[in-house]
Amino acid sequence: MCNMTFEEASGENSTERMDSVATALEKVLSSALPQGCITVGVYEAAKSLNVDPDNVVLCLLAADEEQVEDVALQIHFTLIQAFCCENDINILRVNNTRRLAEILGGGKPGGDDHTPVTQSGT
């Protein structure tokens, strides 16, 4: 099971759907953060995915538009997406890393604007 990214959503109500998904995602992240159910960072997320992929519910891949041409970042994302698809882990691509950083505790997470975020099940 490989999930659709926001870029692939289309139709009349796609903007409304994305807004409601963004609101729901913000609520989920805000409630999961104090419970310690979120892993932030490329290497930390990879470790979490490797150790217990059955316990990972969602993987967010965050990159701003100017980072699209970063080859190393795209390789990381491709590998993480392939692993998530193989293990039936939901994937969302987020293009507003600043807002994601605000939700996860302000500023840039670890100084790295394009870190994947994984959420463990409770």
Image (spheres, rainbow, N blue to C red):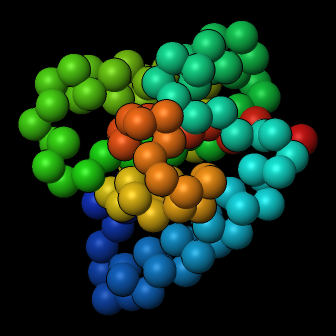
Residue placed most toward the observer, 8 or 94: 94
Judge by depth and name the residue closer to the eye, 35 or 1.
35
Q: Is residue 78 visible?
A: no
Q: Quadrant of residue 45?
A: top right
Q: Quadrant of the N terminus?
A: top right
Q: Residue at x 39, y 35 (%)?
A: 112
Residue 36 vs residue 89, the one in the foreground? 36
Question: In the image, is 39 to the left or to the right of 92?
Answer: right
How many numbered marks appear? 0
Residue 17's x, y, as percent?
47, 80
Q: Is residue 20 above or below residue 24?
A: below
- Residue at the image point whose x is 39% and y is 54% from the top: 97
Q: Quadrant of the C terminus?
A: top right
Residue 48 drawn above or below residue 8: above
Query: Measured along the vertical axis of the image, is residue 35 above or below residue 120?
Result: below
Asked if one can make out residue 104 in the rendered structure from this viewpoint, the answer is: yes
Image-based side of 55 in relation to 91, left or right: right
**Where does residue 27 sit, x and y in percent of width and height?**
70, 69
Q: Residue at x 31, y 80 (%)?
A: 11
**Which residue is painted at 16% across and 42% down in the image?**
68
